[in-house]
Image (cartoon, grey):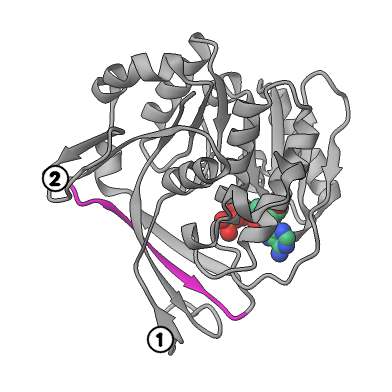
Amino acid sequence: MLECFFVVVFFHPSQAPRLPKAGETIHGHKFFIGFGGKGANQCIQAARLGVKTAMICKVWKGHEVFSQNFVWQTSDAATGAASITVNDAGENAIVIVAGANMRLGEEELQKALTAIRKAKVLVCQLEISSQTSLRALQMAHDNKVRTIFNPAPAIPDLDFGFYRVSDVFCCNESEAELLTGYSVNNVEDAHQAAQELLRRGCTAVIITLGPQGCVVLKAQDKTSTHVPSTAVKAVDTTGAGDSFIGALAFYLAHHPDMPLEEMARRANQVAAVSVQAVGTQTSFPFKRDLPADLF
Ligand code: ATP
């Protein structure tokens, strides 16, 4: 079994009492460098739950590549990087520079096609060019590989082709807001936004709502379902969305017939564990850390 995920970047988180305003410099508590990119994070979370995963991405040629994944190199751009600030409330602000990943294109996808065809699930984000993401989703869709599309970082005027090739279109509140033009501040708003996203052609929509869990809407149903999360003390929510999507990919691969609402309930529980520790990949739970009834 194989899932393919996209994008690897380095990230540079700082912890500070609050997020700085424009033009402001503030003292932080701590700075460190870690691994990331949404694709890499999602891939790591899925792998920690027990599926075989692969990445398709591009990095600067100075980095050594040891894995058998589809990691290409270029001398024309630096490896992607993201600067993250986390405040004492566990909230974050992120700037990402995708770098080499923007040079991933049709040629590399064609080389990965045999592996994509054999995968059970393909997950895409927007940390590579949107054309490449859409093409990868189309390849998977044409080959009956189930797709999860995470439109993050969100772009306005997203090509409607993305909706038609998404088995699960999974975004957070701010992405749903940018894509639909509705304001999404609570569960009721998320129900409305999910209906709008579904109308655009996807098979199912999930909108994640931080501590409130998520809203799930399937094409065969008229109404969406609110799937609440577990109340926990969050110390750092960075990467919670990636933990959720990695877990969702795991359930889609391992339990393809499980109702999507149940997959979302379990993914909420996995992500709720991740927000109780600092960092992104470092906070993602392994199978051994989780109750057996999640598997
Ligand atoms: P990020 O950008 O910080 O990675 P996100 O905005 O993409 O996250 P969220 O909607 O904040 O994603 O969170 C994703 C999932 O993580 C939620 O659906 C929920 O299951 C879980 N989660 C997030 N925050 C909390 C919290 N404070 N308590 C419990 N669960 C949480």
Whether residue 274 can be seen here: yes
Q: Residue sitting at 48 percent across and 62 percent down?
A: 282
Q: Residue sitting at 55 percent across and 49 percent down?
A: 242
Quarter holding residue 106: top left
Residue denoted by label 2: 61
Q: Residues within 10 Å of mark 2 (few under 14, many from 20)?
A: some
Outermost residue, bottom side:
27
- The amino acid beneath tag 2 is Lys
Choose the circle earlier in sequence order: 2 or 1: 1
Quarter holding residue 76: top left
Where residue 51 appears, as percent x and y from the top left, is: 52, 34
Where residue 240 appears, as percent x and y from the top left, is: 60, 56
Residue denoted by label 1: 25
Q: Nearer the viewer, residue 229 or 253?
A: 253
Task: Say whether residue 167 is left or right of residue 65.
Answer: right
Distance in Å between CA atoms under marks 2 and 1: 34 Å
Quadrant in which ligand 1 is drawn: bottom right
Q: Which mark is residue 273?
A: none
Task: Say whether residue 255 is left or right of residue 49.
Answer: right
- The amino acid beneath tag 1 is Thr
Task: Say whether residue 223 is left or right of residue 50.
Answer: right
Asked if the magenta segment contains residue 87, the reply would be: yes
Quarter holding residue 196: top right
The residue range painted magenta reads 76-88
